[in-house]
Structures are given as structure tokens and as C-alpha cells.
Image (cartoon, rainbow, N blue to C red):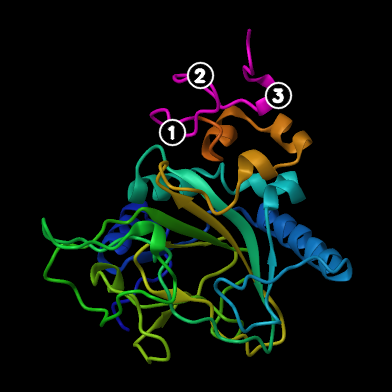
Amino acid sequence: MSNAPRPTTDMARMKADLAEHGYGIFEGAIDPDTTAAIRDRVLEQAAAERRGNVVTSNVAVEPEDAVNQWVAFLPNKGKIHRALINNPHVLEIVRYVLGQDAILSEFSAHITWPDNEEMALHIDQWFMPQPMMPGEDYERPANAHRADRLCGDPVEANHPIPPPVVCNAMVAITDFTLENGATRLVPGSHLSGRNPAPDTDYDVTFAEAPAGSLVVWEGRTWHAASLNTGTTPRVGITTYWAAPFLRQLLNFTYGLRPEVTADLSDQERALMGFKPWSTYGTSDEFGADWARPGKDNVGELK
């Protein structure tokens, strides 16, 4: 598509691309030394996890792929990764889409290896109920399933649609190219209020971007990883963000290793959900500034 977003260093252009197309590419967000250090750490960890028979697949989004690899829960696997969630460009873009109090929901590396399977197009906020008129029966949100979504064409709707409640800021740790499986997207699909139908061909664009770039799409945008027909892996890191009232994909408050939690800054703790939002996420005292582990909370008293 001739009018599809191209890599830019102009933050105003980036935000305009997100509003118009549902995604944008911000070039040079991560400096080359940090990008290279993260790439080396991710690939080292990935090799060790394969040797150790760690489960590295993600059946929710790649149910038929045994080639691609996820290195999950990156904060536990090297302090260097935290540079990405402290990056001012990442935070400015995410907060433009979701607002100031957005929290981190997922923080993992996705490695597309040669000879992989193509990921199906999907949206990240597949769980959102559809708007309806007063008195109409409604979709029970606790009954939502990925396979049972309202599908349609990627054209702008003429009726109300849900707003974005999640945002994915993927960091290109290697170059993203047509050959190595650059993320494919459907521009404008975020305004359709629909999901892509399975096994259907759509007019897509590919987010070709140099290493150190951010490929950002909001939660309603149709997207997927693509076939790696090259000879080297594509490494992307998903920093996936959500409104503060949503359950996080990764349970940071439970799953972070103790030594990692102890080393977090206040900003990092807030981004990972340790700070209650309007009392949501409170662990004991309503109005407390921070959630506390169970051992520090009041138990039975007499």
C-alpha cells in the first residue's frame, strides 16, 4: 500500500500514523549498543532454554508452529531488558494510545526462525465485548473465546466500536525484513470493529524496519508475524501494555524472582502493576500506595 506508514523519527507523524492506520514505525528508538546487547542476551537465553527443554512455544497465537520460539518473562532473564520499558519513546507512544496510567502486560521475546509456520492474522483485544443498544442481549465477557469472534471486512464501521484498551510496542532487535518474517498488518483495520476471518486473504503491509525501531500497533489492529524465508532469525521483543483495570498477560507481582523485584525502581514497579489503580490491585489496605506480599499483610486477629 502506497500510503502505509513508513519508518519515521517524527513523534507527531508516529502518532498520526497510529490514529489513521492503527500502527506506526518509530526508527532509532533504541541505541545500537543496547540493541546489540539485548540481541546477544536473548539469543543466548533462547539457546540455553532449548537445551534445557524449557517450554518455548505459545499455543495461544501459534498453535501449529514448532519452530518459532518465545523467551518469556524477560525481566527475570537479564537486567538489560528493562531499558526497553524505561525508554521515553516507548512510554510516550503507549501513553498516547492508552493514557498515563497504562501498565505492562507482557514482556517477552518472539523469535521467528527460518522454515516457521505463518501466524494467523488476529487482534490483541479479541476479548472486548461488542457495543449494543439498551435492552439488547449482551455478550457475557467471561465467556469470550478467541475462536468465537465477530469477523468482517477491514473497513471503517458506521456504528460505535470499542476503543483500544491494549497497545503493543514491539522492539525490532534485529532488522525486520520481508525475508525474515516482518510483522504484517492491515492498515485501517482498527476502525472496523471486527476480527479477521480465518483462512481469508487480506491486503496487508509489512513492517520493514531497521534494528532499534519500534513497531507499534493498538489493540484493534489486525496483525501477525510472517514466514521467515531467510537464513537468520528475526528477533522482536513485545512490550505489550494495557489499561490498568485489565488482567495482565504476565503475572509480574507473583512471577518475578525476588532479587529482581528488590532491584526494581518505583517507576518499574508501577509499570508492572505493583501500584494499585483506584484501589484495583490492592493487597490489603485500601488506599495503600503499593501492593504488599501476603507475608506483610494482616492476618487473623483476636
Q: Position of residue 6 (x, y in %)?
A: 39, 71
Q: Secondary structure at mark 1?
A: loop
- Residue identifier under label 2: 285
> Whole-Å distance between the Cαs marked 3 and 2?
14 Å
In the rendered structure, find residue 207 and report the number of the disc placed on it: none
- Residue identifier under label 3: 295
Q: Is residue 251 left or right of residue 241?
A: right
Front position in the image: 80 or 247: 247
Q: Quadrant of the N terminus?
A: bottom left
At label 1, the amino acid type is Tyr
Front position in the image: 272 or 93: 272
Q: Residue at x 64, y 18 (%)?
A: 299
Q: Position of residue 149 (x, y in %)?
A: 35, 74
**Which range of residues does the magenta coloring cover?**
276-302
> Whole-Å distance between the Cαs marked 1 and 3?
20 Å
Q: Quadrant of residue 17 in the image? A: bottom left
Q: Is residue 295 above or below residue 25?
A: above
- Residue identifier under label 1: 280
At label 2, the amino acid type is Glu
Q: Is residue 258 left or right of residue 275?
A: right
Q: Position of residue 187 (x, y in %)?
A: 32, 75
The earlier-in-sequence mark between 3 and 2 is 2
Q: Is residue 194 above or below residue 92?
A: below
The residue positioned farthest toward the top in the image shown: 302
Q: Secondary structure at mark 2?
A: loop
Q: Residues within 10 Å of mark 3 (few under 14, many from 20)?
A: few
The earlier-in-sequence mark between 1 and 3 is 1
